[in-house]
Every structure is written in C-alpha cells, then in structure tokens.
C-alpha cells in the first residue's frame, strides 16, 4: 500500500467518526434551543394572559407603564437566574445591557424577560462549544501522537489557545453571541409587528419556531466548521512537534471543487492556514491533512525508525 493510500484510508475512517460525533452534538444543540424556545413561549403566553382583552392586545396596552411590583419581580428573577446559571463574562455583559436598556413599559419588560432566557440559552451554548472543541483538540493531539510518535507538551494550554483563536476575524464565541444579537433583533420585530397587527399568540409561535430553527442550523454549522478548524490546528502543531516540514491535503470523497483542486497537494507546515490551504476551506468542510512523506520516508516510518519519533 502506498503512503498516499494509507493516509487517505486512515483519514476517511476518522471522517466517518467525526460525522457520527457531530450528529450527537447536533442533538445537544437542538435541546438547548428547544429549552430556550419553550421558556420564551411561556413568557409570551404569560404576557397575553395578563394583558390581553377579549379582542386581543393593542400596542397601546402593551406600552402602558408596568407596576413597581412587576419591576421588583423582574429584578428578583434576573438576580436568581444569574446566580443559578453561573454566567460567563460574555453572558453577564449581555444581562447588564438588557437591564440598562429596559424601558418601564409592558412591552420592554416582556423583551427583558425574553432577553434573560436568550442570554441563559446562548451562555449554555457557548459552554457546550468550549467543552466539545477542547475535548476534540486534545483527542486530535492524542491521535496524531499515536501516528507520528511525539505528543504535544503542555497540550491543555495549547488546546485552550487553539479553541479560542480567531478564524476569519472572529472567535467561535463571538459568532455565538452574534447569533444571540440576531435573535434579539428578530424577536423584537416579531413582537412589535405581532402586537400592531393584533396577531394571535399561536401565530407568533409559528414564527418563533422558524426563527429558532434558522439560528439552530447556524449553530450546528458553526460547530462542524470549528471542529474542523481545531483539528487542523492540532495537526499542524503535531507536525511541527514531530519534525515534518510538509503536509498533504486530503479531500473527502464528496468534496466540493475547491477542495478537490487541493487533493493530494503538499504544502509547507510553516504556511499551513485553515481556510487557505487546510481544512476547513468552507463551512461544513470534512476534509483533512496528513504528514507528507515520500516513499522512502514512508517505508522507514513503517519500519518504526526513530527519525519520526517512532520507537
């Protein structure tokens, strides 16, 4: 078996495992979004129950001042929510913005209560991403050590650095909170329009489901793309650690034209860059790389020569 065939087969097995894992991650992301949507739907239903007359609720009714009792109730709820959730720095900042921006009318109070659940849900999402991306980075370090020989020193610190690195001018956490901002803006428009048009809460619920579906798909796509990125960075550090100067791009079997054009090409490890000459070349990319060896080096590697860290 040639060097290229060996590495291609090995990476194909890993790709299949990655896809199985991603299906499990998607289920967890779906659960986070479903819980968030349930809580927000409860807030909207409670709002209608409290303020709607027989003919529905008007925008004028929605913009009446809330009572001091409502404000105090919100404050207690927010305080307990923050305490229970153990929010990240980003989530605490979002809560501060919601509280500062809250106008004292019924509609703004509803938005603030919804905002609280958005922050909680997206904070949970960020923590889940952090956990999975870190685990997969460390797993890739171990996989490469099993192939190439030498493991990464201080791999936990290196993994943290890789996971929180910027990709296309934004960190994964920046993108998660951008999704939250988009949801907040769309929900605000949905509520405002729904009240002006006197829409039934059941109709609002259908729009809400669609809105959450789009955001969830964005999050699932981000997870797949970021998993590919951290694995590529872990591969790069492993190649450096084991003294390889070049690596080979390995396109997946159903690769797009961009990735197919790179398949089999080898590049300098020092110039390895996800999105340019390494995966992910695009969202949802499942391509990979392998340390490049010519036939002589490959035979030596198979024989366990210590040249590449194999004893």
Image (cartoon, helix red, strand yellow):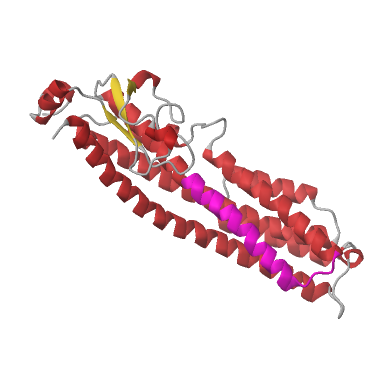
Q: Could you tell me if residue 70 is visible in this image?
A: yes
x 48%, y 35%: residue: 164
Residue 56 at what x, y percent from top left? 85, 75
x 33%, y 27%: residue: 237
Snapshot quadrant of residue 39: bottom right
x 51%, y 62%: residue: 31
Split into 4 quadrants, where in the image is the C terminus?
top left
Split into 4 quadrants, where in the image is the N terminus?
top left
Q: Main secondary structure of the magenta part?
A: helix
Residue 184 at what x, y percent from top left? 70, 52
Q: Could you tell me if residue 280 is visible in this image?
A: no
Residue 293 at what x, y percent from top left? 21, 24
The verdict on residue 232 being magenta is no
Range drawn in magenta: 197-223
x 39%, y 19%: residue: 271
**Is 133 above or below relative to 112?**
above
Residue 309 at what x, y percent from top left? 17, 26
Q: Nearer the viewer, residue 224 or 46?
A: 224
Q: Is residue 128 left or right of residue 211?
A: left
Q: Residue furthest left?
A: 303
The verdict on residue 212 being magenta is yes
Q: Is residue 55 left or right of residue 33?
A: right
Q: Residue furthest bottom?
A: 54
Snapshot quadrant of residue 204: bottom right
């Amino acid at each position: 078996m040639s060097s290229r065939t060996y590495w291609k087969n090995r990476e194909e097995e890993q790709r299949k495992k990655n896809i199985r894992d991603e299906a499990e991650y998607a289920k967890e992301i779906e659960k986070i979004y479903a819980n968030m949507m349930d809580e927000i739907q409860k807030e909207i239903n409670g709002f209608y129950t409290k303020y709607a007359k027989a003919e529905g609720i008007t925008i004028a009714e929605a913009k009446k001042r809330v009572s001091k009792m409502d404000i105090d109730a919100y404050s207690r709820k927010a305080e307990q929510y923050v305490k229970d959730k153990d929010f990240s720095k980003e989530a605490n900042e979002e809560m501060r913005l919601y509280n500062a921006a809250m106008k004292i009318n019924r509609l703004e109070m509803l938005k603030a209560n919804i905002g609280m659940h958005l922050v909680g849900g997206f904070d949970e999402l960020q923590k889940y991403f952090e956990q999975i991306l870190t685990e997969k980075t460390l797993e890739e370090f171990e996989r490469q050590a099993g192939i190439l020989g030498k493991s990464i020193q201080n791999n936990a610190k290196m993994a943290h650095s890789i996971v929180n690195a910027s990709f296309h001018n934004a960190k994964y956490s920046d993108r998660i909170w951008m999704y939250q901002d988009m949801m907040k803006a769309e929900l605000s428009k949905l509520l405002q329009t729904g009240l002006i048009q006197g829409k039934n809460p059941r109709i609002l619920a259908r729009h809400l489901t669609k809105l959450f579906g789009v955001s969830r798909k964005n999050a699932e796509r981000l997870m797949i793309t970021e998993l590919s990125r951290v694995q590529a960075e872990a591969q790069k550090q492993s190649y450096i650690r084991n003294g390889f100067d070049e690596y080979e791009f390995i396109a997946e079997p159903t690769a797009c034209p961009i990735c197919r054009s790179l398949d089999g090409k080898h590049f300098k490890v020092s110039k390895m860059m996800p999105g340019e000459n390494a995966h992910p070349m695009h969202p949802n990319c499942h391509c990979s790389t392998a340390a490049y060896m010519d036939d002589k080096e490959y035979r030596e590697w198979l024989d366990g020569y210590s040249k590449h860290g194999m004893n």
